[in-house]
Image (cartoon, grey):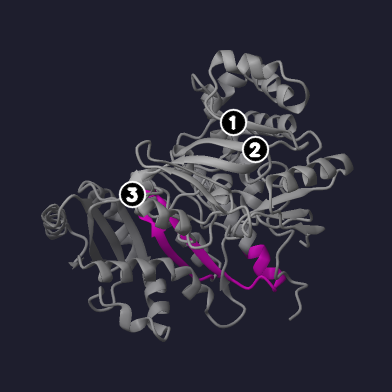
Amino acid sequence: MEPVGVLVPQRTEDVQAALEVAHEHSIPVLPRGGGSSLAGQGVNEALVIDFSNHLNRILEIDPEAQTARVEPGVTLSELNRAAAEHGLMVGPDPASGNRATLGGMLANNSTGTHSIAYGNFIHHVREAEVLLADGTATTVGPTDPSTWQEKMRHDGLEGAIYRGLKALLADGGRETIAEDTPSHWRRNNGYRLETLLDDAPNLAKLLCGSEGTLAVTTELTCDLVEKPATTGLGVVHFESRNDALRAVTTVLETDPTAVELFDGVAIERTLQTPGYAERLTFLEGTPGSVLITEYSGDSDAEIQESLDALDRLVANADRGYVVVRVTEPDAIKNVWSIRKEGLGLLMGVEGDYKPWAFIEDASVPVENLADYIDELSTAVDATDTRAAYYAHASAGCLHVRPFVNTKDEGEVETMTEIAKESLDLVKKYGGVVSSEHGDGIARGWANPAILGDDLYELCRDTKDLFDPERILNPGKVVDAPPMDEHLRMGPTYET
């Protein structure tokens, strides 16, 4: 999908002028940050507005309130470096933090390794300065009933949005949202309409996960959290992936801040990569899978107590055969570095078969994770397809990446079959197909099945309220194309 043009704005006024012209001439617009999204959110036949070059300032860090006010092009790493001077950091921590922007994190409702401790970005955003689809500038944040009434009296698109949302809730929408919203806490499918049911609805939260389809963020304020005084890792070794997954709920009883699966395929690939094999000092032998388990605390003694508890748990369980302790800061950094670089290592495999992202964002309640993966892996194996399984075991979200040759038409059919099988299993086990990486093109097609017809129609109605001309990143979240329609390297691709 080729852009119709690219704008690199220096000021918010540049973005506003572009939106006004685009609205007048019905030109699609795609607000873009670091381009690190994985589901196709950052591509479209549209005017691409790149915020990363100039609108990337940290405007304020308030240590007492523990908040940051930033422009959308600031990267997570840049903000964390500045916040660290005050002993603070951003809670959500996607692996792409050195290039993921805060505007993109809001649009994608990002999270990461520590989601069991800090949740998604929706749990941290306070307010945002936005431009509506026609270029109207406004602020969205917590809105009490009197402020909502005031907003409804506004002329133009802003007033129409607030009046329309009130009518949407009054006409049975409130009940549909309450009854049909997926119950799984780690979810990104569709729009977060349940935020409208709060006593003081915050439309900045509604924008989380909207993928630039409702408004364009030009500034945002988010919460910061205290950096842990110290951390330590216990790398639990297992003979198989199934043993590791069946142990997750037990490991969670020790109150970790993260539990990440690193499976045999990822381990094998790391061992094969020059410069990485010698860094696997936290492994004993060649385990079938490991659970990288992190603890945070106020002292080294507290960390050791947590690791002692993990040792006792593994010793008394029938799964797991050794716990390797990693407590030195440089060694901890090495473990997390390898975990975060795992995607690059997997994608670096030679040949046309690559571990593509299309079912990698599914999440189910953690108590159902082992059964979900057991059935999914059986289905994947039945297609003679190899897959890697890794990442956020603590949150019921494994990044499952089947190796598929998308240049082969038959392989593309296999890919869609696997995606449909994953959808059926996710519904069976009470989960969602999108939990942090978003809908985009890869998963937008599944939203009617995940949300149900009534809730999905409310999402479509919400899109029409915010963007009547459908110019903001069209084809994402609602009315998405089939997942195989815009493959970058499809059957017609030529090198």
Q: Which residues are magenta?
A: 385-414
What secondary structure is marked by label 1? strand
Please report the residue visible at 70 percent of the width from the left and 73 percent of the height from the top.
Answer: 407
Residue 108: x and y in percent read 56, 48
How far apart marks 3 and 1 lie (CA) works out to: 27 Å
> In terms of sequence position, does the residue under pointer 1 or pointer 2 come before the other?
2
Determine crowd level at label 3: few under 14, some 14-19, many 20+ residues with C-alpha closer than 10 A. Answer: some
Q: Amino acid at mark 1?
A: Val
Label placed on residue 86? 3
**Residue occupying the far bottom of the picture:** 274
Residue at the (64%, 15%) spot, across then down: 150
Figure quadrant of the C terminus: bottom right
Q: Position of residue 306 (x, y in %)?
A: 15, 53
> Would you name the residue on which mark 2 appears?
130
Is 7 on the left-hand or right-hand side of 354? Answer: right
Q: Say if mark 1 contacts mark 2, CB within 8 Å.
A: yes
Lateral position of residue 245 relative to residue 298, left or right: right
